[in-house]
Amino acid sequence: MTASATPDSPAPTTTAPIAERRPVTRTHHGDVFVDDYEWLRDKDDPATLAYLEAENAHTDAATAHLEPLRQQIFDEIKSRTLETDLSVPTRHGSWWYYARTVEGQQYAVRCRCAVTDPDDWTPPVLDADSAIDGEQVLLDSNVEAEGHEFFSLGAFSVSDDENFLAWSVDTEGDERYTIRVKDLRTGDVLPDEITGASGGATWSAGGTHLFYTTVDDAWRPFRVWRHALGSTADTHPSGDVLVHEETDERYFIGVGRTHSEKYLVIGMSSKITSEYRVLEADDPEGDFRVVIPRRDGVEYSLEHAVIGGDDVFVVLHNEDALNFELVTVPVDAAPMADLSGCTVVVPGSDTTRLEDIDVFARHIVLSYRRDALSRIGLLPITDAGLGDLEEIDFGEELFTSGVGANAEWDPPLIRVGVGSFITPSSVYDLDPATHELILRKQAPVLGGYDPDEYEQHRSWAVADDGTRVPVSIVCRKDTPRDGTAPALIYGYGSYEASMDPGFSVMRLSLLDRGFVYAIAHVRGGGELGRHWYDDGKQLHKKNTFTDFVAAARHLVDDGWTSADRLIAEGGSAGGLLMGAVANLAPDAFAGIVAAVPFVDALTTILDPSLPLTVIEWDEWGNPLHDPEVYAYMKSYTPYENVGAHDYPAILAVTSLNDTRVMYVEPAKWVARLRATATGDAPVLLKTEMHAGHGGVSGRYASWKERAWELAWIVDTVGAKG
């Protein structure tokens, strides 16, 4: 049967829609797969929209009883949040830059105020409830968003002379931005307008030119353009020059500046290979030169430094260093055939994964990861060269740390951010000479939040192959350890992305209802170094899924919860994880939340015409040309492996305009679950009809969306409302 609802007025129903079967046969490497629901890929077909609207109507009806709980949770989130607030000001040149939020408004207002004492680096204490003397509003996103159901701010870049602002907006959710320019001296928006760009915009020295990228039909940034300020046209402003085009479909391209502001940098990277080109920022019409040519499997990133009076590039690379090493190379040596002439600063290590560098006039800040925790270390730059690495101690068992907003090249203090499961996100200024951490602001949590009422732990599950998998846990101290507590376990496990233990106001609505919250740091992520990633990708991908199941069963075995009180959650590639564990161990969970889930991975990765497919082959393998990869992916991808057995309750959330994981994947998955699965557990699909990969826009809309999901989670395990 087909859904009877129309796109205009779907009728609420408690009967789940059944998608019409329109078989399409796929044949690869001698294998035949009949896909009944591929027709849902046609976004312009009225039947597709009718089906999605019918699913939304069904979901609305099936969850209508949760409206009081949703409102209660939304009110909790709102009551804990200081709605009229502002960020810690960041100094650049003669101004302090900051963002403020105003109660009742969805988006931030970006502002600046003048530096009154050039020698005082203490950020001004600003009054969030009233206008600040001399405040200049640079961009009010609430005004920009008027008349749009979706709004996302991309670029926000002030020229070196601080006279011009370039910003970009996306009002569809498809990650195609329009760049505009504002004269900050007059407040006038210039005629310059660039459409169809990626999110970023980079100024040349002197503010005479803007550099930006555009995407191809697969949403891959592949061209860098140079725009002379003052030129205009309908699509690409008159006179815009194509600076570089990346023809290899495996590579993304981006453009930026070194922190020293001396060089413009074009970066090109696939999943496993990178290449950089540089140009003096005061010569924007010059030619970019390669620093180190790309070689398959060699990744690197670079920054500019002045060490011992010499200009050098500080390079983080993985050639013969699995977890990367830090080196310097003379600027004049570029282009270099390889890294043979470099000077090693921090050698590679089996236990420490070097991740990022921030270079200042007198220090290099190195971000790295050890024992599944993010860390920060300082390398002093002296007249004699570089000093020894000095690690900063943040004093917690579990924490997340990172380098904050540092616009200046030679500041006396370095902005960093720290938080944990129980410590709200905190902004510090670090004195590099003494390692003193000067607290500038801790995110306020209203309503009497007391961190002493909560506890966080690091535990270790054991996977089927004997691998120890870290699990981070937070709960109230009065949570019982007898298996009766409800729990939520989150996972991702792809692209070497690490899921760190950070604070969440929204999570308190679970913890205060007796929930245990856990993150499974499964293989495929980056928590334990590059090998941890390699062991969870391509032909090792199933380790990601078995690690997550092992972590879930570990929570039960340790008395944190029981299988009938445990919810699993993941999004995007983590949504693939959710679909895989639903097939692999449906008895391990009471419910599963899959956000923008990559559940039809094999269909996507087989089609090079789809957005992002070709660049993904380094992550998943190439099933189009490799029969072994095809067979392996088919053995785990959720859509192909839906079986005739009882599944836990499933909630799939997607967005119609998502360009990263298209709505069709969860739509097909839900349709196949409905047609194949046994049992009576509900399977729900919720599609945001005006959003992209990140879901709805606006803070209140985001809170409502999360409250909606949390209410479903609470209800599914029968926790107290």
Image (spheres, rainbow, N blue to C red):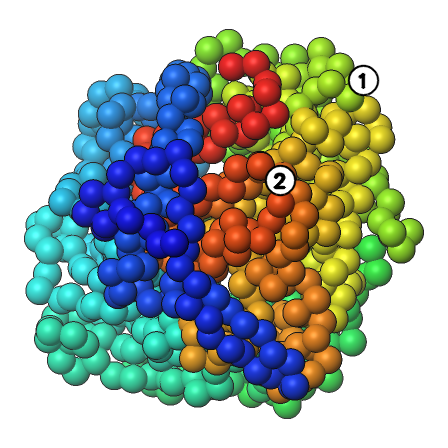
Say which mark, if any, is on residue 482.
1
Where is 658 relative to 28, above or below? above
- Residue 271 position, x and y percent, is 59, 72
- Residue 700 picture location, percent across and down: 32, 31
Q: Which residue is mark 2?
A: 679
Q: Amino acid at mark 1?
A: Asp
Measuring from the top left, give residue 431's x and y in whole percent: 59, 38
Q: Position of residue 186 (x, y in %)?
A: 8, 50
Identify the secondary structure beneath mark 2. loop
User: Closer to the camera, 339 or 213?
Assistant: 213
Tell me if residue 6 comes above or below residue 558 in the rendering. below
Which mark's residue is nearer the viewer, 1 or 2?
Answer: 2
The image quadrant where one finds the N terminus is bottom left
Q: Is residue 544 visible?
A: yes
Residue ID at (58%, 74%) = 33
For residue 673, side relative to residue 582 (left or right): left
Residue 395 quadrant: top right
Picture quadrant of residue 551: top right
**Mark earlier in primary sequence (1, 2):** 1
Q: The disc labelled 2 sits on which kind of residue?
A: Gly
Write the residue at 72% across / 63% down.
541
Query: Residue at 26% of width from left, 19% of height from top?
Result: 129
Image point (16%, 82%), residue name: 239
Q: Residues within 10 Å of mark 2 (few under 14, many from 20)?
A: few
Measure how far apart labels 1 and 2 are at the Cα level.
Answer: 28 Å
Which secondary structure lies at badge 1? loop
**Residue 103 appears left or right of 609:** left
